Amino acid sequence: MAGNFWQSSHHQQWILDKQDLIRDRQYDLAILSEEEYQKIFNFFASIIQVLGEQLKLRQQVIATATVYFKRFYARNSLKCIDPLLLAPTCVFLASKVEEFGVISNSRLITTCQTVIKNKFSYAYGQQEFPYRTNHILECEFYLLENLDCCLIVYQPYRPLLLFVQDIGQDDQLLTYAWRIVNDSLRTDVSLLYPPYQIAIASLHIACVMLGKESHKPWFAELNVDMDKIQEIVRSIINLYEMWKSYDEKKEIQALLAKMPKPKPAPQR
Amino acid sequence: MGDNYQNKTMAPVMMDYDFKLKTQTERSKVEDLFDFEGCKVGRGTYGHVYKARRKDGSDTKDYALKQIEGTGLSMSACREIALLRELKHSNVINLIRVFLSHTDRKVWLLFDYAEHDLWHIIKFHRAAKASKKSVMVPKGMVKSLLYQILDGIHYLHSNWVLHRDLKPANILVMGEGPERGRVKIADMGFARLFNAPLKPLADLDPVVVTFWYRAPELLLGARHYTKAIDIWAIGCIFAELLTSEPIFHCRQEDIKTSNPYHHDQLDRIFNVMGFPQEKDWEDIRKMPEHATLVKDFKRSNYQNCSLSKYMDRHKIKPDSKAFSLLQRLLLMDPNRRITSEQAMQDPYFTEDPLPTQDVFAGCPIPYPKREFLTDDDQDDKSDSKARQNQQQQQQQQQQQQNNTQQNQVQANSHDHVANNAKRMRMTGPNQGNNTGGGGQQEFHQQQQMMFGGQQQGASNQQQGNFQQRF
Ligand SMILES: Nc1ncnc2c1ncn2[C@@H]1O[C@H](COP(=O)(O)OP(=O)(O)OP(=O)(O)O)[C@@H](O)[C@H]1O
Ligand SMILES: [Mg+2]
């Protein structure tokens, strides 16, 4: 569906308004501070990333899974579905849509188990990954429903490649900007801005970091809303600021404990 | 549910009870909104298709409800939903809505209902031909069909979507209604985004295109699907529309083979087209199965074969515009085959008669409506009221509309097994030999009846009324 972003469900339904987003998060934000909320999403984005890498998925698929995850919670509280279940469900669904080939149910569960045990024990301790295939499959229906069947997600990677080509191939610049796009998945920008703007913002940050003054004219000639680009840049820089003084390994258990959780059926 | 997990597996509560209740009450069930019991009209590998009406009567339109085979979200269901959700073109079937039935884990897709498809249309013409009857259709119908198929495929291709399973059964045509006579390309289950191939496509689905519509490069082991492969299939469909015979008809035994190389199908293609010359298809030497080809085939066996001779036998003159376009669609070398865009610019489409938006150009539609399938054991026994009603209604409408001749032909087509697109097998064309004037080209033959002689004036009027230019 490349080249048709403007007619896409992504553009028409899933570029959200910042005020709406904040309003829809009121329930969670009554329990968590905005920073805590972001730290929790940062953590689950890591889970999706590591899961995807273990399953040898392309970054495009991982990014799509992360966007599904964010879209679900843009409309629902964290308590509706345990994010530890939704995260692998997003990976599962994205891999089918992006046609990497189906991941077998058993492989998905085994990978979840090893990833949680080996890479995220600082968050879950001795606790095992508690879900099985039937949970993922049930969750998948809820996910698809909440996504309103919008499964094709446009990512900044392709526009980024084109922009770097346009600037004049520069591998170092591309590598930096590519990583910044990956990092941007831990902010809300994928819910708020079109992917090409995220690509430009990431490129902009990369140029500043690498001190590439010579590319300034290229940005000046762009026919884009520079205010939007600045907003994206700020979101990403804020993330980096947050990271500086944040030790996930120490804080995440308390955050997960504080996170709103699903309530079971009332006991009779 | 929460209880279960807590007590038996000690898992945390996966889903909030209130959330579950709330979504349950908000979710509409397909069977609450639509009447479709006993109204199955199609069965394919990937699902069952029902003709449906809204229960609340808020409109009286017909809808098509496709229940996807199996449970849950298979990869092809995901692809179909993902792509159809994004695609919007008047010649591509419109996905109206998706229903997820949580209790039995079934997935339902709601589409506009298309009364006809090219498989049934061609079959109708063949049956008429066999019984030496003629069928009245406007003389530009084949052209209009082809134009709209190309338009739809051009849209798909320019959005980096390949169809990969083009065949007459997947080309739908709308019946009476606001979109009368409009082509709708359907069955995108296999369609795939191809701008970022992850795996060689051949690895994903062993068999994609029915062999008759398979491009020669696929049969020679090409690893990647391309736009050109869809174009070849369109060429095959065009030829079939012109002659009512599948141009590359071939006995097919084991459709599920994962080996792309298919000797008999290649033999059939060479029998029609002639064996490709080196200069016509330079890269043929690079095909994975080229060695097998050289081993199995002798050029000299096909010395006297050519597309022009084949089409000439079927009353399509080699100097006609139709033939010249066909030849450009059916080039053996995929690199030389024209694109959908180029095809749409072909002089064939600017020559009279011009293509029309309503492929029937306002004329009565001679084809029967879809029948309800009853070959399913369960369906047979539970002869539900809904089906009886709908079928009765349908028959009444049909009798009002159609003449007796076509009801006869319709009676011939109660071949339910053959309705199954995957198992479909047209009675083989009388290999090569011309079955005589009996109706080689009904699509054209009727032009004399309709627009010939004294009717000239009336037909002009009709054209004025109905022939909307593209
Ligand atoms: N929108 C529609 N309106 C009316 N009939 C339809 C519609 N869609 C499909 N059908 C009928 O149902 C049949 C099967 O549908 P479809 O081709 O979508 O399913 P499939 O299982 O993917 O088929 P295939 O075996 O060709 O892969 C079609 O050949 C056609 O006869
Ligand atoms: Mg089909």
Image (cartoon, coloured by chain):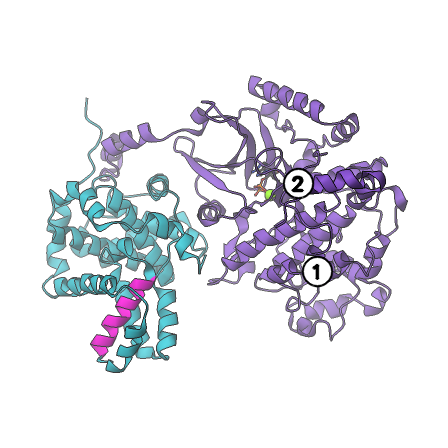
Q: Would you say the residues marked 2 and 1 are in contact, meaning their CB atoms lie under 8 Å apart?
A: no
The local secondary structure at tag 2 comes to helix
State the image coordinates of residue B202 (x, y, percent, origin top left): 56, 59
| Magenta residue span | A196-210
* Callout 1 amino acid: Pro
Please, which residue is most extreme toward the right here? B436
Q: Label 2 is placed on what type of residue?
A: Phe
Q: Is residue A179 visible?
A: no
- Residue A80, percent from left and from top: 24, 39
Instruction: Identify whether B439 is placed above or below A107.
Output: above
Q: Disc 1 designates what residue?
A: B347
In the rendered image, residue B261, in percent from the top left (x then y), is placed at 67, 60
Picture quadrant where residue B225 is located: bottom right
Q: Chain of mark 2?
A: B
Visual hue assigned to chain A: cyan
Q: Please name the residue that numbered disc 2 is placed on.
A: B466
Image side of residue B260 versus residue A97, left or right = right
Q: Quadrant of the C terminus of chain A?
A: top left
Residue B254 in the figure: left or right of residue A10: right
Determine the secondary structure under disc 1.
helix
Residue at image coords 69%, 56%: B350
Q: Nearer the viewer, residue B465 or B376?
A: B465
- Looking at the image, tell me whether mark 2 or mark 1 is earlier in sequence order: 1
Q: Main secondary structure of the magenta part?
A: helix
For the colour purple, the matching chain is B
Taking depth in this image into account, of B228 and B152 the one nearest to the observer is B152
Relative placement, left or right, of A75 versus B334 is: left
